[in-house]
Amino acid sequence: MTPTWFATFRQAEAASADDVASLTKVLSLTPGLTKALIYTPARAQDPYLDDGQPPALALQLYFADMAALHAAVSQHGHLQAVAAADALPSLRGASVTHQAMLARAFPVPDPQFRTPKGAPHCTYLVAYDGSADDPEAWVTHYTEHHTAIMARFPGIRAVEVATRVEWHDVLPWPRAHSMLRNKVVFDDPDALTAALNSPVRHEMRTDFARFPKFTGPVTHYPMATIRIEPARDSGTRPAPGQ
């Protein structure tokens, strides 16, 4: 599994193009980074769910190991530049939470993206923010059964699950405490919408009813996804996949 770090910015307005460009430069220079994803709001239609306005911006960074992740969120870590009060003017005043987790990718039949060069992919970001009576049984069911159904979505390019890990940081934002995060990734919002309206989506709802008991909110947001590769001097190589 791969150490990964999420940050979620919530406000009425989306991040500006200038701030996204600035983030791209800063994130690419993060020591120990293997890849970074910048998520901005997209539109897709889910026949079962509408969780309202998506985050204005979300980030997901992957690191070579937990030591590199901890260094990035330490008192003098590279990500202090992202958290600085003047770092992202269009997101000043946004409500921000962050969380370190361990990410695990699951195989899909055809992981090759058909997205035009330079265009973003589309990710359905899902977060389970509650708790389970038996967390181990709950996560086992999710990873062994629910992901197998996701992999049958038409046009699916990637399936990933992130689970909790012990970690420490010195960033000024409150921590999120999601029990599990999941994402399914497609070429574009139309492909995501087609998948969500396919018979596979109905299978997922049936399996959802079989989950071991848990409580708390679950959110689902379609997000345009830009992949950032680490700069040469960051000392890492990009991880494969999205």
Image: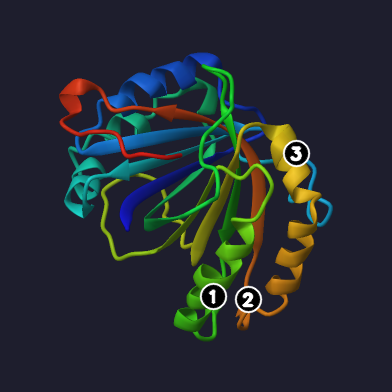
Answer with mark 2 or mark 1, whichever residue precedes in sequence: 1
Q: Which quarter of the picture shows residue 15?
A: top right
Residue at the farthest bottom position: 133
Task: Decide: few, some or many residues near mark 2? Use Cα within 10 Å; few <14, some 14-19, many ≥20.
Answer: few
Find residue 163 and report its horizontal and vertical position in percent. 42, 63
Work out which residue is located at the far right of the displayed protein and give it: 47
Residue found 25% across the figure and 25% down from its top: 29
Q: Residue at x 26, y 48 (%)?
A: 170
Badge 2 is on which residue?
215
Could you tell me the amino acid type at mark 1?
Ser
Q: Position of residue 43 (x, y in %)?
A: 73, 34
Circle 3 sits on which residue? 44
Q: Marks 2 and 1, Cα distance to the nearest angstrom?
A: 6 Å
Instruction: From the image, tell me which residue sits under label 1.
Output: 131
Q: Which of pointers 2 and 3 lies earlier in the amino acid sequence?
A: 3
Which of these two is toward me, 110 or 6? 110
Q: Residue at x 17, y 51 (%)?
A: 67
Inspect the image, locate mark 2, and give the three-letter code of the amino acid beneath it.
Answer: Thr
Cα distance in 3D space between marks 2 and 3: 26 Å
CA gap between label 3 and label 1 equals 28 Å
Residue shown at 59%/54% (left/top)? 126
Q: Nearer the viewer, residue 91 or 191?
A: 191
Nearer to us in this view, 74 or 36: 36
In what element is the residue under mark 2?
A: strand
